[in-house]
Image: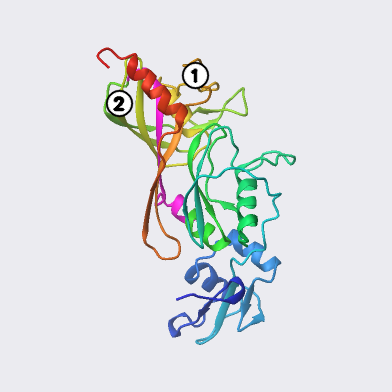
Amino acid sequence: MAEKRAGGWTEHTVTGAQAGQTVQEIVTGTMGVSRRQIQKLTRSRGIVLNRRPTYLAKPVQRGDVVAVRLGGEAAPRLAPVAMELNVVYEDAHLLVLDKPPYLLVHPTQPDQQHTLVHGVAHYYCVRGVRAGVHPVHRLDRDTSGLVVIAKDARTHQRLDEQLRARALRRRYLALVDGVLREDAGVVDAPIARHPTQPVLRAVRPDGEPARTRWRVIERFAAATLVELELETGRTHQIRVHLAHLGHPLLGDRQYGRRGLKLIQRQALHAWRLAFRHPASGEPVELEAALPPDMTQLRETLRGDTPGG
């Protein structure tokens, strides 16, 4: 079993059964470090054997101690930007925020400095917290809801593994154009770049596999409130799949342009997250209520429903 020690290092003592394996096999197998992470660690001398520099192909013996520097980052290099953050959950390993609409999770251009990660950098600074800012996943600028920020590389890696294994479950609420007649379903349609508009995505037979589960929460006269769960994480997946169904998001200016007078952005909110805590293994389940603009739109739609 790997154990933490000072300075952000995690170490593992080689057992008799593991003798003869290479340092790399111990690090990637037993200690669970990704190959991508290993590349960074070798450049920064972040892997040692018996507290001395080593090479990945070196065989280990029983009782050897392999140590990897995971965590203990310096204060974030992002420029701190003061903003109000809605903290849903926080501990020594991670931070979960309820992101408002109209805010990028991270910069998409070098000169962008008003993003969620810049706000987290400020949050850390004013509290004297020394931690990394590692978004585990992202939301579109205009999508609101839950975002997980890992505070160290090890936590980020473990949560990323859950995300890829579909063990980190993400559920969304959406208000869509038209009335869905079925109570639930699955959209299983591959997604690729749009053939003529490279910033957009489209359902295409040569695309990457993409699956979205949906179920109806409430029906209105000309719209539906649905819950959606991602099984994959393609760019714009929910928006593309709903448009493919013929029920685009209300307010979505790129994939439907329905209900633009009702709401100023796509009516999509990441409302539930469930995962295993990367340190304790305990289940974590979090929820963020609908934001004011989607709550108001829901009430407006109820008022337009006969008998509502």
**Residue nearer the viewer, 8 or 161:** 8
User: Can residue 245 be spotted in the picture?
Assistant: no
**Residue nearer the viewer, 68 or 100:** 100
- What residue is at 55 percent from the left and 45 percent from the top? 85
Left or right side of 277 for 129? right
Image vertical order of residue 239 relative to residue 302, above or below: below
Please identify the quarter of the rendering in which residue 244 is found.
top left
The magenta-colored residue range is 161-179
State the SS at label 1. Answer: loop
Queried whether the magenta region covers residue 162, the answer comes back as yes
State the SS at label 2. Answer: strand
**Which residue, as the protein is rendered here, is positioned at the far right?**
111
| Numbered disc total | 2
Q: Mark 1 points at which residue?
A: 256
x, y percent for residue 192: 53, 32
Image vertical order of residue 144 relative to residue 57, above or below: above
